[in-house]
Amino acid sequence: MNKRKYLIILSGAAITAGVIAAAVYLPGRNRVKTPAEYAPEHDTSMSEENETAVEKTVSSDAEKPAQGTDGIQTDIPALHNALASGGGVSHTGVAIPWTALTDTARMELVTRHFNSITCENEMKPETILGHYAPRVTTLYELEEKLDFTAADTVADWITDYNTVNGTEIRMRGHVLIWHNQTPTWFFRENFTIDGDFVTTEEMNQRMEWYIKTVTQHFDQKYPGLIYAWDVVNEQVMDSGEIRTDGDWYHVYQGSGEYIIRAFQYADLYTAPDTILFYNDYNECTPAKRDAIVSFLEEIRTEISPERKLGAGMQGHHDMETPSASMIEAAARAYAETADTVHITELDIKSSMGFDGTDLDAEFARQAARYAEIYDIVKKINADDTLMGHIDNITFWGTHDAVSWLKTFNSVGGSADGKTPQYPLLFDEQLQPKPAFWALVNSDE
Ligand code: GLA
């Protein structure tokens, strides 16, 4: 970022930044509680996050940028404002684990730049249902065992923050139906890990109960906070066929019935203005894209006409693939079919062969790649012939130090665990990278 530009932005944003920082951190009055205060007895070890401590930035440069309580820059534009005014993106989101709530600097970054939050793991079935078989035989008994502690802690924090600061940070619910991070006992007789798989009729009942109980829990406790649910995640393979691994397949044997039913149940039980999403990775691969579009078309006919239907493009991209034209073609296809499109998990893996040595060059390539994607968003959003537009861009993590791509993970869109990864807009010290400026200054 060149210094002149930087100083112009600095003077414009400094006053706002000061006011916001003072409002958030005024001792005693506006402090938001930590996870420990909300739930002192709960074990926080379930987070998959890389627990690398966040280093506090102390610059010796006399012209160092103004910084917040713990070292984030407070004199730069808020990302969500920049994407709203520059790209017509109403929500700019970020995924966080509930353990982030105790990190003041990280949460200052979150609340400054983002107006939508996705829980990294806390709303997933495994967290709410629990990994271990619950020794129950009925849904009635199971309901007593559901654990909303982690998700509620995040929702409480955001609710309190909004109340104190007059902000409207909202949440994407993630996720109801998924083959990963969903305990196998949920699909089996008597809720045991080695029981036979239940019949489709039984599973329909369990699914309906789960979707109803979970969505109504949040709707009743936090009205209006969750404005979108990822109802179904990753159930189409790259070939375009329905996923053939995982317990949903074991029960439904290749029928897509559970996908459609999941949307019918979500339509029945969620607040009427909640947007219902089908969300997937490799979403730009043509065969997969076309199959998702067909599902969306079918779902549309099976839910109430007033209900908003969304297409979630995860956006776990490489530096080289998918090509810009593939991303645009997919975004267009989804925007022609769904009422809205969200980019739900955006991050960018390092260049092929990157060995971690020339970070400046890599950051420049990454900035160009983010700019390329944002240009597509702007193009789609300027096209009035499309039914839906890209209303949300959510980044999968606050900053490089905590990205899931740092380590090997077998989930789709993951990294190999060997190539050094710096996939996000803020560096390991929470400072904005060239990719941040490429989005914020994209019109210059
Ligand atoms: C998928 C899921 C996310 C997350 C990532 C990996 O994309 O949708 O919830 O688990 O994998 O972190």
Image (cartoon, helix red, strand yellow):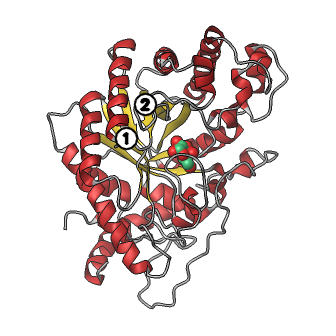
Q: Residue 199 at x, y = what percent?
A: 66, 11
Give the vertical position of 216 relative to 132 (above or below): above
Residue that carries the numbered disc 1 in the rendered image: 342
Q: Amino acid at mark 1?
A: His
Q: Residue 328 at x, y = what percent?
A: 25, 46
- The crowd level at tag 1 (other Cα within 10 Å; few <14, some 14-19, many 20+) is many
Give the vertical position of 63 relative to 216 (above or below): below
Q: CA distance from mark 2 to mark 1?
A: 9 Å
Tell me which residue sits at (45%, 32%) in the image.
Answer: 236
Q: Residue 371 at x, y = what percent?
A: 28, 61
Can you tell which mark lies on residue 277? 2
Q: Amino acid at mark 2?
A: Phe
Tell me which residue sits at (66%, 52%) in the image.
Answer: 48
Compare residues 122 and 416 and report the one nearer the observer: 416
Q: Marks 2 and 1: CB-CB under 8 Å?
A: yes
Can you tell which mark lies on residue 28? none
| Image region (quadrant) for ligand 1 | top right
Residue situated furthest right in the rendering: 135
Which tag, 2 or 1, sits closer to the chain's start?
2
Pick the quarter of the image with the C terminus: bottom left
Pick the quarter of the image with the N terminus: bottom left
> Ligand 1 closer than 8 Å to the CB at disc 2?
no
